[in-house]
Image: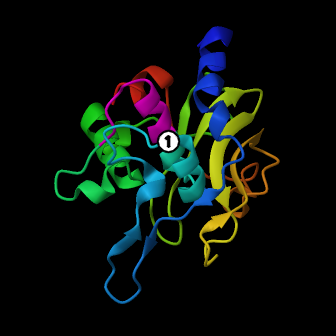
């Protein structure tokens, strides 16, 4: 990926930098999703910027926004449209593309990655999953909150460009010691899924 291409990524998301994190929330009693909007996977087109600012953006939502802006389809769920664009849909699309889980390229702290590589952590255990896009020189763009129980669901830092080894995101704080992400998917692959 060239400098021109990385500038294109930043151009695609620059207006979203600083927008608060948007939490996908569920009803504790029924398990039904109350607020699925921050994933931006079920829209035919993106909402206006002001509406996005009111909803917020989660990490996979930022990736889906890039795909929307490039007129590329969002990984979908055949059973429930509300989950379109979720980490689970992305994982399913990767399994389909590569043929099986072991063939999906694994993230490794010791490797150098191309600009535009999508780092992805699956939803499992206590983690809700996460997505970040590598911008080079250890910089990533992603969206996160350290307050998953914020009643308002909008909290900072939200969409941010930062050094992946100096992030304040609590789930990634040990990144230099052990890998946080599960997968590292090159730009030309993830943008085509």
The span picked out in magenta is 63-75
Whole-percent x, y for residue 91 in the image: 36, 47
- Few, some or many residues within 10 Å of mark 1 (<14, 14–19, 20+): few
Is 77 covered by the magenta stretch?
Answer: no
**Residue 150 lies in quadrant:** bottom right
Q: Position of residue 163 (x, y in %)?
A: 79, 40
Tell me if residue 122 can be seen: no
Residue 78 visible in the picture:
yes
- For image coordinates 31% across by 32% down, the residue present is 73
Snapshot quadrant of residue 170 = bottom right
Closer to us: 130 or 35: 35
User: Up-down: is 25 above or below 28?
Assistant: above
Residue with the mark numbered 1: 48
Q: Residue at x 75, y 33 (%)?
A: 138
Image x and y of residue 85, in percent:
37, 47
State the residue at coordinates (69%, 41%): 17
Tell me the colour scheme of the image: rainbow
SS at badge 1:
loop
Q: Quadrant of residue 123?
A: bottom left
């Amino acid at each position: 990926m060239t400098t021109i291409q990385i500038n294109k990524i930043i151009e695609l998301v620059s207006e979203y930098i600083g927008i608060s994190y948007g939490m996908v929330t569920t009803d504790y009693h029924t398990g039904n999703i109350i607020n699925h909007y921050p994933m931006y996977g079920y829209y035919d087109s993106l909402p206006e910027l002001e509406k996005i600012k009111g909803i917020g953006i989660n990490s996979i939502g930022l990736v889906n926004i890039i795909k929307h802006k490039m007129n590329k389809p969002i990984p979908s769920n055949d059973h429930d449209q509300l989950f379109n664009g979720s980490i689970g849909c992305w994982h399913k699309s990767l399994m389909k593309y590569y043929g099986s889980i072991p063939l999906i390229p694994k993230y490794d702290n010791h490797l150098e990655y191309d600009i535009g590589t999508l780092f992805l952590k699956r939803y499992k255990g206590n983690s809700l999953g996460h997505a970040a896009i590598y911008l080079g020189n250890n910089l990533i763009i992603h969206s996160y909150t350290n307050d998953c129980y914020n009643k308002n669901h909008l909290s900072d830092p939200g969409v941010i460009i930062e050094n992946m080894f100096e992030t304040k995101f609590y789930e990634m704080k040990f990144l230099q010691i052990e890998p946080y992400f599960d997968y590292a998917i090159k730009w030309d692959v993830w943008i085509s899924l």
